[in-house]
Image (cartoon, rainbow, N blue to C red):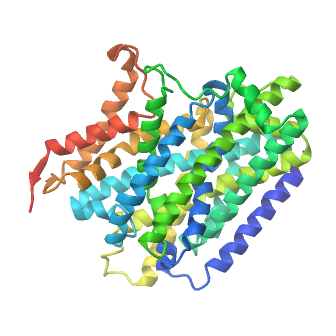
Amino acid sequence: MNPYLIAGIVIGYFCLLILISHITSRKATNDTFFTGNRRSPWFVVAYGMIGASLSGVTFMSVPGYVQTTQFTYFGVVIGYLFGYLAIAFVLLPLYYKLNLTSIYTYLGNRFGLNSQKTGASFFIISRLLGSALRMYLVVYILYEFIFKFIGVPFWTLALCFIVLILIYTFKGGIKTVIWTDTLQTTFMLLSTIVTIVCLLKEMDISLFDMLKQASDAGYTKLYESDWRSNNFFWKQVLSGAFITIAMTGLDQDMMQKNLTCKSLRSAQKNMLSFSLSLIVVNFLFLALGVALLFYANQTGFALPEKSDSIFPAVAFHMNSLTCIVFVIGLVAAGYSSADGTLTSLTTTFCFDILHFDTDTKHTEEQKKKIRKIIHIAFAVIYFAIIIIFKPFHNDSLIKTLFDIAGYTYGPLLGLFCYGLFVKNRRPNDKAVPFVAILSPIICYILNMYSEQLFFGYKFGFELLILNGLLTFIGLLAFNKKTA
């Protein structure tokens, strides 16, 4: 594939994003950047969130994941549905009742400023790492398969991606992100569907026949009955529910988009329709994984060792159409996660660390300048993480991301559960940061020695639940009765 054509596609896609940004950011204020003036149509938010929640990792890692774990990942997807129900009917009513811009303001109201800053800090760490690695994978694939052959350094490509995101989110913020996410979702899904169709046509087989043969070959194994396994079915379902609650319901990036809806009812419609769509879309990615494996078996194509590289390797090996739609889908997947993250990180820092909502010392114009400086600073950190991680990319990134989430979202899960379910008592606000740091450390030690301590048991995604439970217990140990 001509690398200059690929570069032209990327530039053309960026121009389209700039156009949307220009339209959506006219007359933008700080309120537009942070809340979108709370006028977003719920169906637009729901559709755009599909791309935002999937990102480049799902786009490439889930199809490659089928090779080693079959369809057992779908247990996590089933659990997602239960998690989204909890968000729609427990968390969203709370957030709308308090009229929040940053959801971690709730922790400040419930426990104190130390708790608010602790929650915000864990989100910032988790999102910086998670989203930067999602963008890293997109840059890595484009570099390995295209740009290194024309002498473009990895860091230059990464820098270009970050600068482009910074440009089109700089003014419109969350309002721009809501509308660009619809574009990202469209191209990501279109790319997946076109690739599946091309693969089936190349192999001269129907989708249903392929899935039947895949079932006979063991590729569609859904139920893992060994309770000690990482992929034990019920462990996957339970983990999926809590992953959703933590990584969506307690995540400023995802909730900031929901809070741009006009009302609680609209936000709940958005959440329920989005959750059902996500089940279908994840099944589509698993079906793509099967198609890739069948294609390799039928043609003798040698699959790369890294599972994250299976999809791009096959896409670039096939015809030009497959290559082009893959690149468009890949770029869309990369932008869908990164743009919202930069906006939400800026929002969290402004409201939970600098307390814009109660700040009377600075004018709106001064706050706007501060917000822009913070936005640029996070983009620089984002770039640094991408560059630093490259030598350590060995495992499947979707597993790495869930591992990170298990350690960083666990304290958030514990804090919010305590706030929601323990009445008339609050923990010592000064002790909260220490509890939140100690819990992940204990989890790491238990994870390291789980097989020796728990009769061969291996922790999977449920490490998040354990982390949240330890945080909850720690908060109970330092609490006092309140009115």
Rendered residue at 40%/14% (across/down): 456
Q: Position of residue 370 (x, y in %)?
A: 45, 73
How many numbered circles are shown?
0
In the rendered image, the vertical position of residue 200 relative to residue 22, given as above or below: above
In the rendered image, the vertical position of residue 348 relative to residue 404, given as above or below: below
In the rendered image, the vertical position of residue 259 relative to residue 185, given as above or below: below
Quarter of the image where the N terminus is located: top right
Q: Position of residue 357 (x, y in %)?
A: 34, 75
Location of residue 159 (image quadrant) = bottom right
Rendered residue at 61%/26% (across/down): 221
Q: Position of residue 142 (x, y in %)?
A: 76, 45
Q: Position of residue 381 (x, y in %)?
A: 52, 53
Q: Nearer the viewer, residue 325 or 66?
A: 66
Classify residue 372 as left or right of residue 456: right
Classify residue 377 as left or right of residue 410: right
Is residue 389 something one can see in this rendering? yes
Q: Nearer the viewer, residue 166 or 57?
A: 57
Location of residue 71 (image quadrant) = top right
Quarter of the image where the C terminus is located: bottom left
Is residue 374 something one can see in this rendering? no
Classify residue 348 as left or right of residue 343: left
